[in-house]
Image (spheres, rainbow, N blue to C red):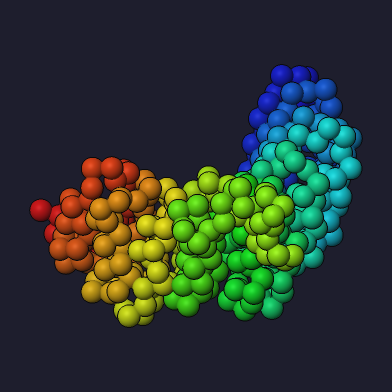
């Protein structure tokens, strides 16, 4: 590696490197090399390895993307990396994946605060960080104000304090484009709160403040209020593996989510969406709404829809969609379909 001065991408996932292996790699890679992507998922890397990487980063590198997911890094290692990111000269890091590491709420807070100090950092993965359910939402206060465009918060139990902490924090992330809340234990009521928040923040909503109102001194928002995000705010939303449609009478505002926002990609797989449910009815009405929806990709996999729901409800709604409808990709894997004739 020390002779590979043109090396740009190094991917060594599942190589059982450990802390010593990572240290050896960092010693071999020249600071003058062109390495921009370092992917080391599932390598038994712990805090010692994370601290070695922090020193490497602080020394000044051209790294643009680092993947340390599925390792053994705790809050101490996360804090070391966060501190290095803030101190590194001319920091260029754009993507950091720390998902599936036991960094707990202290690690989340350190990384959120570091992201505010690094304009280049646009993608942050912190899913399955083993944060305490009672604290995972509270640390969202430190998330508000970041310039992140892509955020993965999967695997956290976010029900407690959902409306009070998490939703306002997300509304204070004006650059957010992609959000993953997969497997967060969200039920119909949590989904309804999410839809209401997204509707209020969407540029398509009549109640949403305009950009002029948000910047005009005469119409300044009260202290503590959530400013209006830009028109391109939040295009992709991953809600896989929750229980948003677990009850047949629950709609959680699915139709309003599509007609009142500019979502282009929505993952609702494994959410209990079933035939004859209010959520499915709401979805079908939205798909054939005269004004159309911005949605281009919809994943309904692993929902117990069955033949009747797909052939009598979903397919007719797609056929009745207005010409300007944008839906191009539909996933229906493992939805109990038996007759595709």
Q: Closest to the observer: 234 or 224?
A: 224
Total label count? 0
Q: Give the residue displayed 74% in from the left and 65% down from the top.
A: 223
Q: Looking at the picture, does residue 184 appear above or below residue 16? A: below
Q: Is residue 144 left or right of residue 117?
A: left
Residue 90 position in % (x across, y down): 83, 32
Residue 320 position in % (x across, y down): 18, 52
Q: Give the residue displayed 23% in from the left and 47% down from the top.
A: 322
Q: Is residue 313 left or right of residue 188?
A: left
Q: Is residue 234 left or right of residue 268?
A: right
Q: Residue furthest front?
A: 218
Residue 58 position in % (x across, y down): 88, 39
Q: Is residue 209 left or right of residue 222?
A: left
Q: Residue furthest left?
A: 341
Q: Looking at the picture, does residue 64 appear above or below residue 190? A: above
Q: Is residue 44 visible to the viewer in this orientation of the structure?
A: no
């Amino acid at each position: 590696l020390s002779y590979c001065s043109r090396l740009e991408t190094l991917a060594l996932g599942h190589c059982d490197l450990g802390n010593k292996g990572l240290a050896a790699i960092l010693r071999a890679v020249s600071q003058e090399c062109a390495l921009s992507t370092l992917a080391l998922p599932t390598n038994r890397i712990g805090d010692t390895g994370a601290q070695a990487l922090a020193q490497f980063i602080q020394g000044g590198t051209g790294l643009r993307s680092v993947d340390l997911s599925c390792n053994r890094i705790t809050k101490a290692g996360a804090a070391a990396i966060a501190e290095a990111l803030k101190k590194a000269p001319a920091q260029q890091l754009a993507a950091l994946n720390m998902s599936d590491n036991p960094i707990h709420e202290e690690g989340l807070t350190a990384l959120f605060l570091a992201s505010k100090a690094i304009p280049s950092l646009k993608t942050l993965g912190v899913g399955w960080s083993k944060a305490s359910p009672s604290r995972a939402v509270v640390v969202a206060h430190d998330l508000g104000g970041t310039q992140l465009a892509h955020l993965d918060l999967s695997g956290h139990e976010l029900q407690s304090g959902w409306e009070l902490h998490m939703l306002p924090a997300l509304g204070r992330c004006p650059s957010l484009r992609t959000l993953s809340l997969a497997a967060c234990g969200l039920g119909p009521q949590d989904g309804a709160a999410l839809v209401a928040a997204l509707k209020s923040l969407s540029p398509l909503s009549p109640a949403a403040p305009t950009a002029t109102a948000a910047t005009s001194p005469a119409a300044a928002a009260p202290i503590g209020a959530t400013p209006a995000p830009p028109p391109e705010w939040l295009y992709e939303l991953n809600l896989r593996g929750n229980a948003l449609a677990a009850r047949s009478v629950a709609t959680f505002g699915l139709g309003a989510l599509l007609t009142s926002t500019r979502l282009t990609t929505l993952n609702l797989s494994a959410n209990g969406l079933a035939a004859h449910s209010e959520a499915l009815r709401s979805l079908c009405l939205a798909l054939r709404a005269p004004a159309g929806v911005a949605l281009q990709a919809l994943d309904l996999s692993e929902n117990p829809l069955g033949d009747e729901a797909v052939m009598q409800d979903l397919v007719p709604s797609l056929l009745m969609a207005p010409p300007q409808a944008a839906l191009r990709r539909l996933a229906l894997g493992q939805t109990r379909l038996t007759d595709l004739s």
